[in-house]
Amino acid sequence: MRNFTKLFLAAFLLTGLAFSLHAQGVGVNADGSVPNNSALLDVKSDAKGFLPPRMNTIQRNAITAPAEGLIIYNTDEETINFYNGTRWRLLSQVVCGQRFRDPRDGKIYPTVQIGTQCWMAKNLNIGTRVNGSQGQTNNSPTPVIEKYCHENNEADCEVYGGLYQWDEMMQYSTVPGVQGICPTGWHLPTNAEWTTLITFLGGEMVAGGKMKESGTAHWAASNTGATNSSGFTGLPGGSRETNGEFSILGWDGNFWSSSQNSAATLTCLSSVIGMFFNEKASGLSVRCIRD
């Protein structure tokens, strides 16, 4: 052990750094100073940085029983992630009400605070488009997020977001509230979280109008009761049916819940928002909620 310590110390000296052991901690620095009393490890440098482990999202998620506070650099997202004891999060949290960039593809999303919740104010649009005639698949161990665009038109995804089957959205988990296809720091809303939102906005009979984008730029001409007073800016992305056909673009907005078989729907015909059961093989819109 003594010889190992000598070799370890020699390696640090060869790099121009001093390695010192003290009762209060370990110091790695160029000037040989005693480490700060509050630090177990005190690294000082004016020329080099600290390099945490670098791994992609698949490798990060494969870590068995990560410790609370574990830190890695996510090469897919080009950002630092840490584990908070429950899920992986960003080191710096998005300020709700401001736009943020999804590091996976560079797309920009507005956000909105509604009561105690922070929601994306735009439908998620992540992944590679596949035709509506085919199912979305679990292509692990190197997963590729797949999406549908209305009538297989990529331009519609840019406006209304992608449409996703439930399993694809969940990334083949069945646990309510998982990250799924959302960016790190965000997750898929559960039934309880949808209910919290609807209740805050006055209940099912009026909440839909407060959530829909107003006007008829994207909604059908009636768009009854739409005020968007919540800032949710719900859009009518329609759906991809289980037979592979697309329908109701401009008329309905259908949003998955991460609680099995359930979704929320907005319609141009009223101010009502309803929760309903839907087949997992359908393609619906996705909104993410901040952790």
Image (cartoon, rainbow, N blue to C red):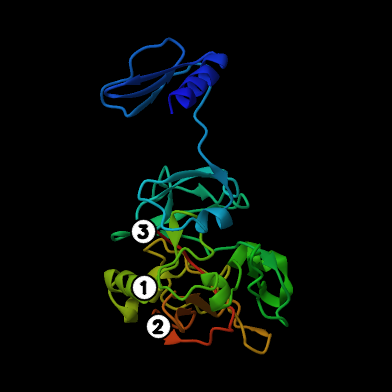
Q: Is 57 situated left or right of 94 in this image?
A: right
Comes first in the chain, label 3 or label 2: 3
Q: Residue at x 50, y 78 (%)?
A: 254
Comes first in the chain, label 1 or label 3: 3
Residue furthest to the top? 31
Write down the residue under mark 1: 194
Q: Quadrant of residue 42?
A: top left
Q: Which mark is residue 275?
A: 2
Q: Is 36 situated left or right of 20 in this image?
A: left
Q: Relative to residue 17, is residue 76 depicted above or below? A: below
Write down the residue under mark 3: 86
Q: Residue at x 61, y 64 (%)?
A: 159
Could you say where residue 74 lies in the image, as x and y percent from the top left?
55, 47
The secondary structure type at the circle numbered 1 is: helix
User: What's the amino acid at mark 2?
Assistant: Met
Q: Quadrant of residue 35?
A: top left
Q: Nearer the viewer, mark 3 or mark 2?
A: 3
The crowd level at tag 1 (other Cα within 10 Å; few <14, some 14-19, many 20+) is some
Q: Nearer the viewer, mark 1 or mark 3?
A: 3
